Amino acid sequence: MRPSRLDPLFAPATVLPGVGPRVGALVARVVGSDGEEALVRDVLFHLPSGLVDRRHRPPLYEMPPSGPVTVEGMVERIEKPRGADSPWRIVLSDGNATIQIVYFKAQPDWLKKLFPLGKRLVVSGDVEWFDMRPQIRHPDYVLPVERAEEMPALEPVYRMTAGLSPKVLRRAIMAGLERLPELPEWLSSDLLAQRGWPAFTTALNDVHRPASPQSFGPSGLAWQRLAFDELVASQLALAIVRGSVSRGRGTAWKAAGKLREKIEAALPFELTVSQRQALAEIAGDLAGERRMLRLLQGDVGSGKTIVALIAMAGVVEAGGQAALMAPTELLARQHFATIAPLAEAAGIVPVLLTGGDRAAGRGETLARIADGTAKIVVGTHALFQAGVEFHRLGLAVVDEQHRFGVHQRLALSSKGMAPDTLVMTATPIPRTLVLSYFGDMEISRLTEKPAGRQSIDTRASPLGRIDEVIAHLGKAIDAGGKAYWVCPLVGESEKTDLAAAEERFADLSARFGARVGLVHGRMKPAEKDAVMEKFRAGDVVILVSTTVIEVGVDVPDATIIVIEHAERFGLAQLHQLRGRVGRGKDRSSCLLLYRAPLGETAKARLEIMRQTEDGFRIAEEDLRLRGEGDLLGTRQSGMPGFRIALPEVHGELLEVARDEAKLALTRDPDFKSERAEALRLLLYLFGRDEAVRLMRAG
């Protein structure tokens, strides 16, 4: 049970003033509660993205060229619009000069009430110059002089969503701060003294009510404190699950390697050095009596699935079952298609279990899993839901693919499932992020491509040369080639001029006819599968697609990929997309089409793509260029699974957080002290509930 003192923070955000059901849905979207109802805690953890300094109060005759200003003056007159597209203009005077306050399409009665003639007002907003005169369009604040203190001198700015007013969000945050309960300190006093960090509740107040621009932002003491709290919660949860896994005795799966020999004999290539090294590390874990928790980290095309299959075959040979879980049905089917013929060569018939299975066939599959005749099971997250019973599950392979992290691993342990666990990720992750996200795991890295794979020729070209690109593509297709053409959108949008996949499909179809196919995220799985099958078979030779092909699509004879508006993609995503080609023995090419002129960051991204195919170097550069961008793709800011901690600012705190978590567990392994109670509050606050249950379980 969550401690009652946290109830004010775990109340729904709709208890806050101005947040009804409709606004609550908008708030949930902006505070990132993943489709769930937003809580007061979520609102408070939505930290500012910028700061407006309203302390600058120049006289009206010294208006700057632009930027935020706060002015004081008397309402001299109100000028009506001169036409349908003209604005209302309110003239403010301080006796020496004037400034115009401009509103488009405003209600006359509302304006006259807000700007009474002869009234002295304080107005704050962004100044600009029009027709040689300063003006403020739609100001942020208009207040009588006697109420000027209601306007914050330093006002944080927050990431927003359409339909949500900044004032409504700020009011909700301020009300949330008033609900903060008194909480015991969970950090050690010597660390607090050394770093100069405030208490948790003080830090939250300071972040949302900054005292100065110098103390504001991720490098300020208040934000540092909150980031460290989040890192400690994560590291503590990782240490607890690690301890739980280590305490739980596993099964020693010792295989003679006969099934592995048969699988290797069926492979069209030799295993790489790093594949063999990873398999040795996994076999060592499986043969031991402590349960395995290992991350298999490899770049696109490095052969993770083969390593997973051989590991699963070892457990099957030793008398157990193995399951491979993928995050989407498309990916599960892709894995099954890769694994099935190799497994069958070793005498193992795998089964596939997804949400789209028909009832009759599903019942038979569940029965085979339950009685143990299904030795290898491939499926989606449904594999670990109610109704799926394994006879003797020895190894769970989780295809992480950006979506399966610490929370799910904790949930798996807390449900009493005790298989050895191998997590695969195709995203090369910088060391800092590996520490934060997979700190509870041993790590194996695949650093080479399978033998016979050639490098990909990567080039960049402006969109103005698209006709030449299509002409060259036609020649390649006529010579027997297959190509992907990736666009960032489906359908036109008023807010962007990006070429849409549907429009590009129409353009290419006009030239190449029925040999062009289209795949996007709005299609039903069966429709996508049908188009992909035509692409594999060669009936479709140009596949126009959105980023749904980013992961899990394997067509070895596709040798060309064109990525349109490449400047709009992050480096990690460009690298994943490029990985769709170069999967066979023929030389492949990647063309990055961009809209000129390029900004410095976009130019650097495309240059790195041209220079290297090393996913780990690309990941490091992506982290450097994007700063707080999340390389794992689940969130738009912060480290993966984190709301507050930013890798480029708080990365050095990770080691300190690990030490703090280890120290707490070393001093009180049974979680009986007052400090342990405080740490339980910390885990609940940052959503590590599963770890609390493991703490209780001892």
Image (cartoon, rainbow, N blue to C red):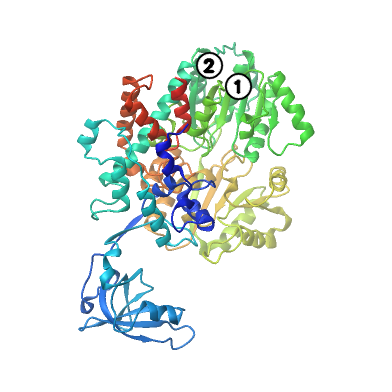
Mark 1 neighbour class, 10 Å CA radius: few under 14, some 14 to 19, many 20 or more: many
Quadrant of the rendered structure where residue 242 is?
top left
Q: Nearer the viewer, residue 381 or 602?
A: 381
Rendered position, 181 above or below 238 = below
Residue pictured at 74% horizontal, 31% vertical: 362
For the view shown, which residue lies furthest in the bottom direction? 82
Rendered position, 355 above or below 136 = above
Residue pictured at 35% horizontal, 31% vertical: 678
Q: Which mark is residue 286?
A: 2
For disc 1, the marked residue is: 312
Mark 2 vs mark 1: which is more N-terminal? 2
Left or right for 288, reference 122 = right
Percent of width and height locating residue 611: 42, 45
Left or right for 605, reference 487 = left
Rendered position, 72 above or below 698 = below
Mark 2 neighbour class, 10 Å CA radius: few under 14, some 14 to 19, many 20 or more: many
For the view shown, which residue lies furthest in the front direction? 4
